[in-house]
Amino acid sequence: MYDLNWQKLEVQITFPLITKVIPRPAQFAELISTAKSLSEGIPFVRVDLYNFEKRIIFGELTMYPAAGFQKITPPDFDYLWGRELILPRQKHLA
């Protein structure tokens, strides 16, 4: 997992960490722009995009990866990411 500056994060979500360094995709800025556009207005969504032979291919939008039960290590990351999630207020029905 990498941040928006392509700095490797020492965070594990369900699967073991990969020690191999992955090069920054040539179309990284376009991938980020596409993900932001597809996720606009959605409080939380995983956007799956693939960079294949200089083309960006859409995979899927996932609202609840692993039904929200993935183990995040270290736990601090779970807290840090969770505090960034701002859900819209629900209107109470009379």
Image (cartoon, rainbow, N blue to C red):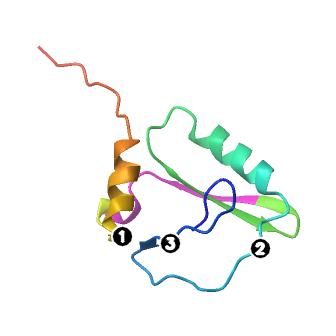
- 60 is within the stretch colored magenta: yes
Tell me where residue 80 appears, x and y as whole percent. Answer: 38, 51
- Quadrant including the N terminus: bottom right
* Residue 10 marker: 3
Q: CA distance from mark 1 to mark 2?
A: 24 Å
| Total residue callouts | 3
Lower position in the chain sequence, tag 3 or tag 1: 3
Task: Assign a secondary structure to mark 2.
Answer: loop
Q: Residue furthest top?
A: 94
Q: Which residues are magenta?
A: 57-67
Residue 86 lies, with reference to residue 23, above or below; the image says above
Give residue 44's position: percent from left, percent from top. 44, 45
Crowding at label 2, few (<14), some or many (≥20) Cα neighbours within 10 Å? few
Of labels 2 and 3, the one closer to you: 3
Amino acid identity at mark 3 = Glu
| Numbered badge on residue 23 | 2
- Residue 42, x across and y down, in percent: 48, 37
- Distance from disc 3 to disc 1, alpha carbons, whole Å, reads 8 Å
- Marks 3,1: beta carbons within 8 A: yes
Picture residue at 55% right of the left edge, 67% below the top: 9
Crowd class of label 3 (few under 14; some 14 to 19; many from 20; radius 10 Å):
few
Q: Earlier in the sequence, mark 2 or mark 3?
A: 3
Callout 2, which amino acid? Pro
Instruction: Name the residue beneath numbered marker 1.
Output: 74
Element on which disc 1 rests: loop
- Horizontal and vertical percent for residue 14? 39, 76
Residue in the picture at 66% in, 85% down: 20
Relative placement, left or right, of 9 versus 58 is left
